[in-house]
Image (cartoon, rainbow, N blue to C red):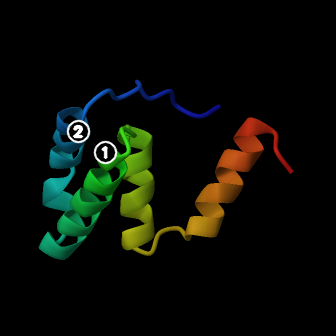
Amino acid sequence: MQKQYPEVHSLEESLAILKKYKDDLTKEQYEAIRSNIGNFAIEDMFLNERNIIDNIKILKGEATANEIITEYKKEWKIS
């Protein structure tokens, strides 16, 4: 069972979550994720902690986007 992460309702909340991981990221990785958060926020979509962790995994080479998508599909029981 996946850990449940609370819904996020603002850009500020998403950025506060990202800030918790700042010391684990290079400046470039941090800025890339910050930019991604901002791009989603333009459309009133806000990344929660799981989304941010997924971004970190991809940037660090710990997972591919396809692996993350497959994880979500299994969780949502989508083929």
Q: Quadrant of residue 26?
A: bottom left
Q: Secondary structure at mark 2?
A: helix
Give yes or no for contact between labels 1 and 2 (Cβ–Cβ under 8 Å): yes
Give the residue at mark 1. 41
The image shows residue 64, relative to residue 18, as above or below, that is below
Residue 15 at x, y percent in the picture: 19, 44
Residue occupying image coordinates x 32% and y 56%: 39
The image shows residue 40, relative to residue 75, as above or below, that is below
Task: Name the side, left or right, on which 37 lies relative to 2.
Answer: left
**In front: 37, or 5?**
37
Task: Name the side, left or right, on which 72 lies relative to 39.
Answer: right
What is the CA distance from the residue labelled 1 to the residue labelled 2? 6 Å
Q: Quadrant of residue 27?
A: bottom left
Residue occupying image coordinates x 74% and y 37%: 76
Between discs 1 and 2, the one toward the N terminus: 2
Give the residue at mark 2. 11
The image shows residue 61, relative to residue 71, as above or below, that is below
Which quadrant holds the N terminus?
top right
Residue 62 at x, y percent in the picture: 47, 69
Determine the residue located farthest toward the right in the rendered image: 79
Q: Secondary structure at mark 1?
A: helix
**Identity, as a three-letter code, of the amino acid under mark 1:** Ala
**Identity, as a three-letter code, of the amino acid under mark 2:** Leu
Residue 32 at x, y percent in the picture: 26, 68
Task: Name the side, left or right, on which 72 lies relative to 22.
Answer: right
Residue occupying image coordinates x 64% and y 64%: 67
